[in-house]
Amino acid sequence: MTQYYPVLLSLTGKRCVVVGGGKVAERKVGSLLDAGAGVVVISPQLIPQLQALEKERRIQWLARAYRPGDLAGKPQETTALVISATPDAAVNEQVAEEANHLGIPVNVVDKPELCSFIVPSSITRGELQISISTGGRSPALAKKLRRDLEKIIGHEYAEYLELLGEVRERVLLLVPEQSRRRQIFQELVCSDILQLIKDKQPDRITELLRRIIPGY
């Protein structure tokens, strides 16, 4: 089995190609748009949801079947990654072959043997991202683990992380000693801030921060 290297990619403004125009392609397009990518969809037809995105000019649509040479784009363009989501095995193999030849990361849905990368099952809470992968052995298990974790890690974690980020900037300004900073950061993540966010008690959060951080 392939041993994968976990990594989070910055795709903001980068060209990403999705081959296919069905429900699976729609999910892949949605996650790429969420990441800020510039998405090109190659497919003779699109389901209504993707048609709406094209009308809103959120995606570029090449309204035809995939052709060898499509992945490289124009001479001034660079393709960051490719996802093939068609029911045609021969097309998927062609897409993977071209992407590998060009050195472009490629994912063929439900065909890990054709992939140079796989997409984990993920939980997103604001800027907090937790990804779960089974290396392609059992996507169903990855989805189950994601659902289990979603029950534990609620949407309050988005506000929690945002607050910790803001407080960290203050600590860097107020506390010059690195060892003391580390101690404060540890106290913060072990404190009751998350529960106070759940209970909607901002005054008590402020009191706690003032107690932990000198000069806050």
Image: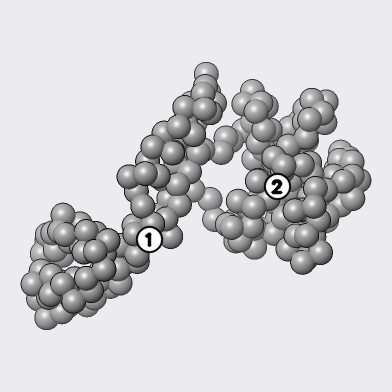
Label 1's element? helix
Query: Residue 71, which numbered label?
Result: none
Question: Residue 161 placed where, x, y %?
Answer: 33, 61
Tell me how far mark 2 sits from mark 1, CA to CA.
26 Å
- Amino acid type, mark 2: Glu
Identify whether 79 is placed above or below 198: above
Question: Residue 111 placed where, x, y %?
Answer: 66, 26
Q: Which residue is at a point 86% across and 40% down the rendered structure image?
A: 66
User: In the depicted view, which residue is nearer to us: 178 or 17?
Assistant: 17
Q: Residue at the top extreme? A: 1
Question: Residue 115 placed where, x, y %?
Answer: 64, 31
Q: Using the rendered image of the protein, determine whether residue 171 is visible from the camera's viewpoint.
A: no
Question: Residue 6 placed where, x, y %?
Answer: 46, 39
User: In the depicted view, which residue is nearer to us: 161 or 73?
Assistant: 161
Identify whether 69 is placed above or below 15: above
The residue under label 2 is 26
User: In the depicted view, which residue is nearer to us: 168 or 77?
Assistant: 168
Residue 54 figure quarter: bottom right
- Can you say which quadrant of the picture contains the C terminus? bottom left
The residue under label 1 is 158
User: In the depicted view, which residue is nearer to us: 68 or 133?
Assistant: 133
Q: Residue at the bottom extreme? A: 215
How many labels sit on residues?
Answer: 2
- Amino acid type, mark 1: Ala
Q: Residues within 10 Å of mark 2 (few under 14, many from 20)?
A: many
Answer with mark 2 or mark 1, whichever residue precedes in sequence.
2
Q: Which residue is at a point 38% across and 57% down the rendered structure image?
A: 155
